[in-house]
Image (cartoon, coloured by chain):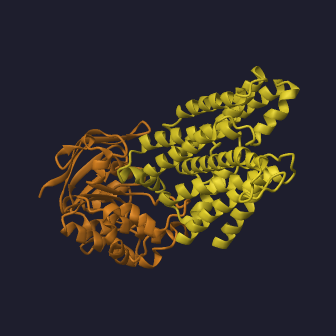
Amino acid sequence: MTLRWFALGCGIIACMLIGLGAGEQWINPFAAHDPMSGTILWELRLPRLLTAFAVGGLLALAGAWFQVLLGNPLAEPYVLGVAGSASAGAVTGLMFMPESAWAMSAGAFAGAWIGIVTVMFFSHLGSSRMLLAGVVLAAFWSAVLALLLALLPEQGLYRAFSWMMGDLSHSDIPVYVLLAAWGVALGCGLLLTRALDMLLLGERHAEALGINVKQLRQRLLLLASAVTAVAVTAAGTIGFVGLVIPHLMRLLFGSLHRAVLPASAIGGGLLLVLADTAARTIVAPAELPVGILTAIIGVPVFLFLLLRRN
Amino acid sequence: MAAVLMLSNLSVQRGGTTLLSDLCCSCNAGEVVVILGPNGAGKSSLLLALAGLIPATGLIELNAAPLHSYSRHELSRHVAWQGELPPTEFGLTVQQRLELAAGEQSANIENVATCMDVKPLLHRPLGELSSGERQRVELAALMLRDVPLWLLDEPTAHLDLKHQIHCIHMLKEQRTRGRAIVMVLHDLQQALAIADALILIDGKGNAEYGAAARLSDSQTLSQLFDASVITQGDVLVPDYGGQS
């Protein structure tokens, strides 16, 4: 187990160094003495890497929470429609203020919270009904999004689609805010680890073991949704990280949340750093949407581990 | 003996249907009360109500204080509930399952695992076990809960004969240690082997409580289950028909 933690730590350091060096032009982070290289490394690449790390970690944490909250291993941060409402908000912002740099992020954040408040109305339902309500709400927000995209002027479409497939190049949230959100989210999660572990036994068992399940579910829903809202606002909708990283970490570190949550917060960051590095390097100077790369990198790794474990 | 659990005019409803009404009974320390009745009569719902997991009307007193005066956490220090098998999707191992039940008593895990014959399974995920093995894990988890009242929903379900007998012996031993136990059983012989008192729920909203010796006659039980229960020697058994 210690070896696995060590490997994860080494992995994140290695990915950070590769991410710093790689790009349109390779720059050795230990030998960047000219001002231009320094500017590229420390003012462009490093903030973006840290943004990717924080967003990936937030998505993986939210995924782990949603899976336990809904008692469903297929749950992920966007399952209750928060991504759809955030996307609809982002496109609305773009539609009404196409020149504003902040319009999409502000719209996404507002949209995400509209989605969260809507979902909260269903938090008193059991896991399966809440999941059903979330899936239906997600379909509703998808329809709203499709309508808005149909009405969006042509020049805004590329920006909208690029954002919707995950875009770390224009994050409007300062990197220190994202790192603080990562730390706060992980800290809150660690305070709830024992209650989350109990919830793995089912709601009745958890309640019989002294957990106030109703209160826990509300807190968890709010926490996971807020974290999703921050991640979506920062980088658009990036799929796969929140679904697969918690499972990957359960395979590597076991099911108890005192290990799953920190491992997911780091592992999600690691995957997104890797994916973003690949996304801005493979076809440089152009960029690929990072959401595509998260799936291309993560799926084979996950399937390999799954088969190896069996 | 002090009454650990006291019920006065208890009624339990689910989905708008009254499952049982006006039940009065008590369970003392070192006493076993067995709930009998046909499928769907409300036996499991009664246990859930006693555990404070679903609402009920009337008065439930635990150690002479109303159940609703306990917080969820306080209640878990007085009552242990064993019901359906927990889900297995997230890969919990037997050891982790027992750790969650044990809380501060994790030093006892090895002992109870040995007692319930699950020690060789400790590092296996729950999802890889048979229903019988999982039931034994749940019984081991129960043994880690050193609380005055155990509420058990079919503790011998899924178990083979050896482990059914072992389970009943374990429960009898717990009774001698002063544990109050209220449980649902479907096996008549098991029920009558261990019960000090019975709660009979007929599925029509009626519930009757009394000493096992008073209620365990073939006519009462035949009526309760709408099936023939006969006396063979001194023992009440379901009438499966004679040997061919």
Name chain A's colour: yellow
Give residue B196's position: percent from left, percent from top.
21, 62
The reply to whether residue A41 is in sight is: yes
Look at 73% across and 43% down and name the residue there: A168
B61 lies left or right of A173: left
Is residue A80 visible from the viewing direction of this image? no
Q: Quadrant of the C terminus of chain A?
A: bottom right
Name the residue located 63 percent from the left edge and 28 percent from the top edge. A110
Along the horizontal axis of the image, is B176 left or right of A252? left
Q: Is residue A135 above or below residue A73?
A: above
B20 over A206 or under it: above or below: above
Image mark count? 0
Q: Residue furthest front?
A: A34
**Which of the two residues, B172 or A304, is positioned nearer the viewer here?**
A304
Viewer-nearest residue: A39 or B54: A39
Q: Residue A163: which quarter of the image?
A: top right
Q: Which residue is at a point 51% across and 72% down the rendered structure image?
A: B124
Q: Nearer the viewer, residue B99 or A57?
A: A57
Q: Position of residue A60 (x, y in %)?
A: 61, 51
- Image colour for chain B is orange
Q: Position of residue B122 (x, y in %)?
A: 45, 74
Q: Position of residue A249 (x, y in %)?
A: 59, 61
Q: Is residue B242 left or right of residue A253?
A: left
